[in-house]
Image (cartoon, rainbow, N blue to C red):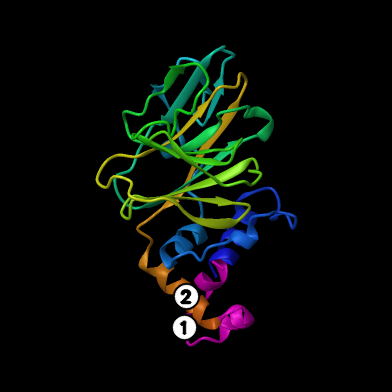
């Protein structure tokens, strides 16, 4: 159920379906109902302020677009540079979308989550997001997970679009790639502290786009709708109009499927 919902969500908000040659579907991990509902909900407006990069908490080598959803790293030698989102969260389940072309990554291209005090500039070429205890990151070029300067490897080619799934209540960070929920990459993130999406880069001309998609708590109606669809199963989804429900609820179930 989790994989099918994630794949449906991917095709709904992207330009095309999940690639049949993707290496990620075999690695799918079952999503909980809470995440499934979040993914099954309509994305918030692209203009939502939660989609903004911070104009203050960023390296001077990052330039923000007028809409604040994109940052561009200026060419700078022997410098590692980071930026975090303008708004963080202390509780709830939240999903952000990050677009970063593989052609614009170079080395030390990292996406993840940070506290307020994560360093956003350093001399030389290094991992910033995940390089200390203030952040957790996925290095996209080498497929390494980083926290507190320690890393573990995940040897897979990472496409342009990655979803960050932060459960601030449980203290976990996970990723969705090619419509596939890969499970928890990090646990034991601090609870009750503001946590921000963040990236770091060393490549001149790198363009990185952020969009906040959705968060919980989900509406009770959405949870009930998910339970009904799970009960019906894929084979009986076309029988929703036969349920003993008011037309309004039947229409809701059909339109949210």
Q: Main secondary structure of the magenta part?
A: helix
For the residues bearing labels 2 and 1, Cβ distance under 8 angstroms: yes
SS label for mark 1: loop
Mark 2 secondary-structure assignment: helix
Q: Residue at x 37, y 31 (%)?
A: 132
Residue range of the region highlighted in magenta in the rendering: 233-257
Residue at horizontal 37 percent and vertical 63 percent from the top:
219
Name the residue that disc number 2 marks.
Answer: 249
177 shown above or below 151: below
Q: CA distance from mark 2 to mark 1?
A: 6 Å
123 part of magenta stretch: no
Mark 1, residue position: 245
**Which image quadrant for residue 195?**
top left
Percent coordinates x, y for residue 112 in the rendering: 46, 39
| Above or below: residue 4 compared with residue 42 | below
Identified at 50% across, 24% down, the residue is 126
The residue under the point 59% across, 57% down is: 180
Q: Is residue 136 left or right of residue 73?
A: left
Badge 2 density bin: few <14, some 14–19, many ≥20, Cα 10 Å: some
Percent x, y of residue 203: 60, 22
Q: Name the image quarter holding the C terminus.
A: bottom right
* Residue 59 image offset from top left, x and y in percent: 44, 19
């Amino acid at each position: 159920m989790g994989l099918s919902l994630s794949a449906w969500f991917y095709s709904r908000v992207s330009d095309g379906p999940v690639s049949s040659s993707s290496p990620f579907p075999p690695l799918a991990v079952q999503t909980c109902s809470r995440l499934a509902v979040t993914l099954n909900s309509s994305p918030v407006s692209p203009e939502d302020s939660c989609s903004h990069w911070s104009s203050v908490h960023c390296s001077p080598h990052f330039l923000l677009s007028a809409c604040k959803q994109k940052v561009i790293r200026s060419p700078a030698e022997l410098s590692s540079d980071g930026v975090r989102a303008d708004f963080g969260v202390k509780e709830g389940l939240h999903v952000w979308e990050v677009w970063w072309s593989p052609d614009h990554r170079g080395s030390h291209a990292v996406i993840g989550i940070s506290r307020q005090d994560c360093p956003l500039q350093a001399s030389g070429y290094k991992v910033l997001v995940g390089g200390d205890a203030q952040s957790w990151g996925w290095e996209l070029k080498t497929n390494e997970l980083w926290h507190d300067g320690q890393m573990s490897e995940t040897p897979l080619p990472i496409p342009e679009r990655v979803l960050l799934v932060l459960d601030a209540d449980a203290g976990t960070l996970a990723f969705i790639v090619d419509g596939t929920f890969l499970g928890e990459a990090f646990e034991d993130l601090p609870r009750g502290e503001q946590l921000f999406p963040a990236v770091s880069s060393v490549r001149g001309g790198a363009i990185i786009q952020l969009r906040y998609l959705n968060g919980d708590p989900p509406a009770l109606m959405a949870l009930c709708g998910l339970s009904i669809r799970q009960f019906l199963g894929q084979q009986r989804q076309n029988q929703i109009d036969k349920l003993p429900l008011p037309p309004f609820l039947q229409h809701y179930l059909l339109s949210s499927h």
